[in-house]
Image (cartoon, coloured by chain):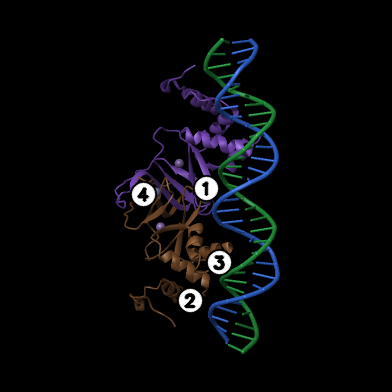
Chain colours: A brown, B purple, C green, D blue
Amino acid sequence: MQLCCKSTNPFLVDLQKKAEEMIRHRGERITPGRIHILAMLLSERRAVTHHEIEERLKGKHRFDRVTLYRVLEWLNEKGFVHRLVSADRVWRFRANIHEHSQQHAHFECLRCTKVVCLNDFETTHDFALPAGYRSREVELTVKGLCAECV
Amino acid sequence: MQLCCKSTNPFLVDLQKKAEEMIRHRGERITPGRIHILAMLLSERRAVTHHEIEERLKGKHRFDRVTLYRVLEWLNEKGFVHRLVSADRVWRFRANIHEHSQQHAHFECLRCTKVVCLNDFETTHDFALPAGYRSREVELTVKGLCAECV
DNA sequence: TAGTAAATGCAACTCTGTTGCAAATCCACA
DNA sequence: TGTGGATTTGCAACAGAGTTGCATTTACTA
Ligand SMILES: [Mn+2]
Ligand SMILES: [Mn+2]
Ligand SMILES: [Zn+2]
Ligand SMILES: [Zn+2]
């Protein structure tokens, strides 16, 4: 069953189904790990760590730590999610809801280390790189205090 | 011997001496670790890792790994250097040569993971944060390929 | 309904950085 | 110039995050 982008049911609230559909639409293999983890990430509004994912998956399905790492790596490679590292040197993952979500800024709380994606953001790339350097992407992180930590 | 900023000898090419002067000027304790490590960082034009520092210090002075970490932490706390983490989850350190060097961008090579500080850079902070969020600093990283890796 | 390539679980491992504690060192003050 | 006492250093052990190898299980294709 091949599904076109336009045929995506807007009332498909079940994220497990949505995750499955996203993966199948790209012709990739469906596995419990991919479904559960992507569904979990689709439900989050901020970038979450490996630990947080593990925590939220408790009760739903039990995965080995390594499987979780490997699924996250795969989701990142295939472009379903993106990954970023903040000052605590821990990977954080977030689903790529929109196609154009590669270029966006992040907010990082200096106290609770929470990371939020700032989707609506304008970046002006007028800077001069050293000779011979080639820019591929620009990452902008705003550091400060979140609403809970002010 | 208290030295004023303006009395800094512009012909003081010996970085060991310069490092010592910087630390003494702030009334902090002089130790071999601080002198050698700060001098090494003053000689670099890019942000370097713990490993690279260890490597460059070979022959000059032998320090324990832990001492190196602790000196770097101290230099960062006191504002002699700044620290950043890139996609490989490794700390990189760079001397704060100029007073205003807190706000500047970085370039990170996607192939060799080298990090270069882009000192001459204009940042425009016109973005909207979620309600209640407070911005303290903005970090901008340009990712791409360096001259050697293009 | 096989056959096969890919995904998973488990154990052991690496890499980066941290902590506790005793020995060495720096420096303010006598 | 010599000392007391807080700081810094070295060493060993530890911790957290992520990786690798390999046998077993699973998903898809034919
Ligand atoms: Mn993001
Ligand atoms: Mn820098
Ligand atoms: Zn916070
Ligand atoms: Zn490079």
Pointer 2 indicates a residue of which chain? A
| Mark 3 Cβ and ligand 1 under 8 Å apart | no
| Displayed-image quarter of ligand 1 | bottom left
Q: Distance between the residues labelled 4 and 2?
A: 42 Å
Q: Which mark is residue A63?
A: 3
Numbered disc 4: secondary structure: loop
Residue ID for mark 1: B114
Residue ID for mark 2: A27
| Mark 4 Cβ and ligand 3 under 8 Å apart | yes
Amino acid on which the number 1 mark rests in the picture: Lys
Q: Which mark is residue A148?
A: 4
Identify the residue at image location x=48%, y=49%: B108
Query: Considering only vertical position in the picture, is B141 above or below C8?
Result: above
Observer-side mark, 2 or 1, equals: 2
Q: How far apart are marks 4 and 3 (CA)?
A: 32 Å
Identify the residue at image location x=37%, y=73%: A13
Task: Give how far across and how far down residue A138 sits, in percent.
Answer: 40, 53
Q: Which mark is residue A81?
A: none
